[in-house]
Amino acid sequence: MKAIVYTKYGSPNILQLKEVEKPEPKHNEILIRIKATAVNSGDIRLRKADPFAVRFFFGLFKPKINILGGVFSGEIERIGSEVQRFKVGDEVFGHTDMSFGAYAGYNCFQENGSIALKPATITHQEAAVIPFGGVTALHFLKKATIQQGQKVLIFGASGAVGTAAVQLAKHFGAIVTGVCSTANIDLVQSLGADMVIDYTKQDFTKNGETYDVIFDTLNKMSISDSLRSLKSCGTLILSAAGLKEMFEANWKSITSSKKIKVVTGIISHSAEDINFLKTLIEAGQLKPVIDRTYSLEQMAEAHAYVEKGHKKGNVAIEIH
């Protein structure tokens, strides 16, 4: 089968299309013919080993995992002898967690992983882009325990996590403000944001507004400045924070008179979360946002585009 393989850390050009052995499902696994995946920030970080700490978990001198891809949509071709949740022919989508491996024609996953039946109303490309931003936004917003009518600001509202966060926060009853560039204002408004701030023209930390939740999806927001706009006992979500930002935010939460709550760290997810997203898609409350679609053979080009940091929503990969 075809797969995109990388054997060293570096630029997009290290990603090579190769023929690799088709996997065999174990007794508790399903073999999925992958029809679509996506290029996400996690793939970029692993390919580059940036930050350096990536190497301590995924290989100090070279990557232990040679096929990236953390999300997928496809069709079940075979099942293990003990599989009960799914059957051959089911169309499914999901998140691979830390196993990756979706940059390939086939892969095996445990049936109890973060996998659900694909909504019939969307394509495989649309289904594949939902889990990364969807489960990330859902994980952090659940920890914020949003109440009806609370004010939530999403910084980086036009990215993979941001477009999902806007829609999920609206589902939870929030009054949502999205922060993005001029080019993405219409997109963020179309996702249900009550207000959109163009960061190239206005600094939200200086407009006098305060919010119950501030969600930084990009790790590009000033933590100190943002605290001015956070209500007392409010929640600061840092989904993309590095160790430096985590330390700074937690220190300020201890020393601030506002008694803020900081939510950061590694996400967790389950099949229940994927099924929740599926329900919202079917109800028309969660829409996939795709900027561009590339073929598997164009993976290096797709990585280069995502790495520029200007994509709207997601970049999908179609696998034939």
Image: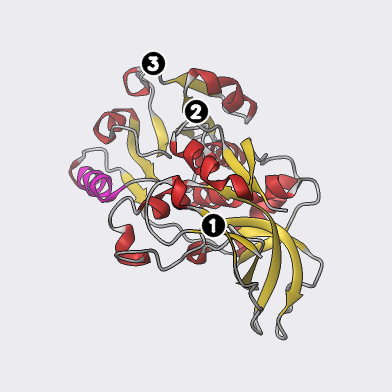
Picture residue at 46% right of the left edge, 59% below the top: 6
Q: Residues within 10 Å of mark 2 (few under 14, many from 20)?
A: many
| Residue that extends furthest to the top in the rendered view of this protein | 201
Say whether disc 3 or disc 1 marks the residue closer to the N-terminus.
1
Q: Give left or right: position of 232 versus 272.
A: left
Q: CA distance from mark 2 to mark 3?
A: 12 Å
According to the image, label 1 marks what residue?
A: 70
Q: Mark 2 or mark 3, which has the lower sequence index?
A: 2
* Magenta region includes residue 146: no
- Identify the mark nearer the N-term, 2 or 1: 1
Tell me the amino acid under the disc marked 1.
Answer: Gly
Q: Secondary structure at mark 2?
A: strand
| Vertical comparison of 230 with 295: above or below | above
Q: Residue at x 64, y 82 (%)?
A: 26
Is 123 in front, or is 271? Answer: 123
Image position, residue 98 (x, y; %): 47, 64
- Camera-side residue: 1 or 141? 1
Q: Of the residues tagged 2 and 1, which is closer to the observer?
A: 1
Q: Residue 320 or 36: which is nearer the viewer? A: 320
SS assignment at label 3 = loop
The amino acid type found where label 3 is placed reads Gln
Give the magenta range.
242-253
Where's the N terminus, which quadrant?
A: bottom right
Residue 189 makes an appearance in the image: yes
Compared to residue 207, the image places residue 51 above or below, namely below
The residue to which callout 3 is attached is 202
> What's the mark number on residue 178?
2
Q: Residue 250: within the magenta?
A: yes
| Residue type pointed to by label 2 | Gly
